[in-house]
Amino acid sequence: MLAFILYLNVMPEVHPERLVELNIYLSFIVKMGVQFPPPLFYEYHKNFSRKAAAILSTQGRKINWSIRDDDLYFQIFPGRHARTCDKCSSVDHSTDFFSIYFSWGY
C-alpha cells in the first residue's frame, strides 16, 4: 500500500486529471484491507493493476480505477467473511481501532 501512496504522489504531476480517481481507488483498497484478512486486498490490487496495464497496452484505453471490478472482486473474495469489530459489529474498523478511538473521548 505504501508503494501505491508513493505512486499517487508522483502520478498527478503527469496526469493531474486522475488524482481523484486514484484517491478513490486507494480508499477502496484501504477499506478492503480493514474488512478482509491479508493478503486479499493485495491480491485484488495486483490483479486489477495487471488487468489495467494489459488493457492499456493492447487496446490503448485507460480504465477508471475508481470503479470496482466486480468480476475480479467476486473471484478473490467469494464467501469470505468480512472482519467485524467485536464491540459494535461494524466492518469499517477493527476492534483495536474502536478501543483506541473511544479511549480518546470521541
Image (cartoon, helix red, strand yellow):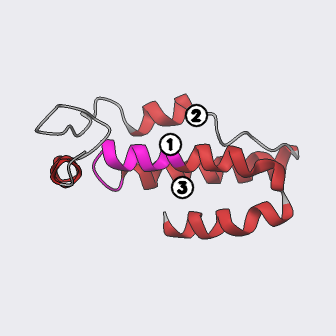
Residue 91 x, y percent position in the rendering? 28, 35
Sequence-wise first label, 1 or 3: 1
Neighbours of disc 1 within 10 Å: few (<14), some (14-19), many (20+): some
Neighbours of disc 3 within 10 Å: few (<14), some (14-19), many (20+): few
Rendered image: mark on residue 28: 1
**With 20 as the anchor, is 29 left or right in this view?**
left
Which of 56/85 is in front? 85
Sequence-wise first label, 2 or 3: 3
Residue 53 x, y percent position in the rendering? 72, 53
**With 52 as the anchor, is 37 left or right in this view?**
left
Label 1 vs label 3: CA separation? 14 Å
User: Residue flagged by tag 3: what amino acid is it?
Assistant: Lys
User: Residue flagged by tag 2: what amino acid is it?
Assistant: Asp
| SS category of the residue bearing label 3 | helix
Circle nearer the viewer, 1 or 3: 1
Say above or below: 93 vs 15: above
Label 1 vs label 2: CA separation? 11 Å
Rendered image: mark on residue 46: 3
Image-quadrant location for residue 84: top left
Query: Which residue lies most toward the front here?
Result: 105
Say above or below: 8 vs 56: below
Image-quadrant location for residue 24: top right
**With 57 as the anchor, is 103 left or right in this view?**
left
Number of numbered discs present? 3
Neighbours of disc 2 within 10 Å: few (<14), some (14-19), many (20+): few
Q: Which residues are magenta?
A: 27-39
Rendered image: mark on residue 69: 2
Q: Residue at x 85, y 42 (%)?
A: 61
User: Residue flagged by tag 1: what amino acid is it?
Assistant: Phe
Q: Are marks 1 and 3 in contact (CB under 8 Å)?
A: no
Residue 7 x, y percent position in the rendering? 65, 67
